């Protein structure tokens, strides 16, 4: 008596998330790394010879800059690419089962960060430039008042830059939690993202209180974030772990044996 092997039907709606997750992982990681590299390239054209906290010297340098607005528009665009990469990456790390609260909060934090980037670049890229240009052409009797106006704008920039780093740090910390809960990226990459996020938060507090002093937190934050982006991109494009959902694998194995 011939016994026909049972036919196993895999619902396309179930199989689709596997391809979608891999595509989102590749797209998100590539956008993240590309945005960070673009940010570095654009920032290399930023006027940055003077100590940023020596306002007399640095305001004169900013006033003499001919590409100031273009550079900051480029930084704004690169920053949005980074945020878009993070959000896309979070979609790829969304668990197939269980709560998705961490992902949703992380996406909200990323959107908030993008909003603060817009405010920061508006203050730095336009308002500060107008203030230092006005200072440069002010008559001697108005110089002190014009300088004070420029300093006020600079202090507002400190606040926006500080909160940008803090919200970005919170976003990256939540991203590290999502990595731990997902199988799409190696879990050992999560501590790298966590280090970057905590360093961003520490740097944001420093910028808000003391200005653009640079220092260890700033270097650690950007270096660790770039390393994480490289790891994510290499993992996504080399394949690495199998795509989710993992429950498809037993069905595929049974198909191959029949």
Image (tube, helix red, strand yellow):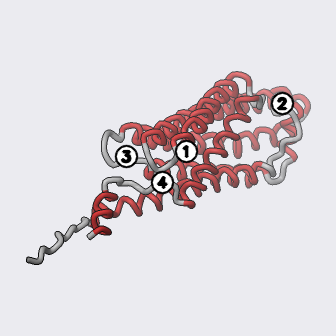
Q: In the shown orientation, is residue 223 left or right of residue 45?
A: left
Identify the image quadrant of residue 237. bottom right
Is disc 4 surrounded by few (<14), some (14 to 19) or many (20+) residues within 10 Å?
A: few
- Dot 2 falls on a residue whose secondary structure is helix
User: Which callout, 4 or 2, points at the residue further toward the start of the chain?
Assistant: 2
Residue appearing at x 32%, y 39% in the figure = 99
Residue 142 appears anywhere in the view: no
Q: Mark 2 — residue?
A: 55
Q: CA distance from mark 2 to mark 1?
A: 28 Å
User: Reading the chain from its start, which is encountered first: label 1 or label 3?
Assistant: 3
Q: Which residue is mark 1?
A: 114
> Residue 50: image x %, image y %?
88, 36
Tell me where residue 193 appears, x and y as whole percent.
58, 38
Q: Nearer the viewer, mark 3 or mark 2?
A: 3
Front of the two marks 4 and 2: 4
Q: CB of mark 4 within 8 Å of CB of mark 1?
A: no
Q: Which mark is residue 101?
A: none
Q: Residue at x 35, y 54 (%)?
A: 245
- Mark 4 or 1, nearer chain start: 1
Q: Is label 4 in a helix, a strand or a loop?
A: loop
Dot 3 corresponds to which residue? Answer: 95
Q: Is residue 36 visible?
A: yes
Work out how far the residue at label 3 is from the one at label 4, CA to CA, in angstroms: 15 Å
The residue to which callout 4 is attached is 241
Q: The N terminus is located in which quarter?
A: bottom left
Rendering coords of residue 126 (x, y %): 70, 45
Viewer-side residue, 130 vs 169: 169
């Amino acid at each position: 008596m011939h016994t026909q092997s049972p036919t196993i039907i895999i619902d396309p709606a179930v199989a689709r998330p596997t391809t979608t997750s891999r595509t989102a992982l590749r797209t998100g990681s590539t956008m993240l790394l590309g945005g960070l590299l673009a940010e570095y390239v654009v920032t290399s054209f930023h006027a940055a010879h003077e100590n940023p906290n020596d306002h007399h010297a640095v305001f004169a340098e900013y006033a003499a800059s001919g590409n100031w607005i273009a550079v900051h528009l480029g930084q704004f665009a690169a920053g949005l690419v980074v945020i878009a990469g993070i959000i896309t990456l979070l979609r790829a790390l969304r668990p197939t089962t269980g709560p998705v609260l961490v992902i949703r909060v992380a996406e909200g934090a990323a959107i908030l960060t993008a909003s603060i980037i817009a405010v920061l670049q508006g203050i730095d890229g336009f308002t500060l430039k107008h203030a230092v240009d006005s200072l440069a052409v002010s008559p001697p009797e108005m110089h002190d008042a014009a300088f004070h106006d420029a300093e006020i704008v600079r202090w507002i920039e400190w606040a926006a830059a500080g909160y940008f780093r803090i919200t970005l740090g919170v976003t990256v910390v939540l991203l590290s939690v999502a990595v731990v809960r997902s199988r799409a990226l190696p879990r050992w990459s999560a501590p790298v993202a966590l280090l970057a996020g905590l360093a961003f938060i520490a740097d944001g507090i420093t910028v808000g209180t003391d200005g653009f002093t640079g220092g260890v937190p700033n270097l650690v934050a950007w270096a660790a974030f770039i390393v994480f982006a490289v790891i994510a991109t290499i993992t996504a494009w080399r394949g690495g772990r199998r795509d989710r959902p993992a429950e498809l694998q037993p069905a595929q194995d049974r198909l191959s044996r029949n």
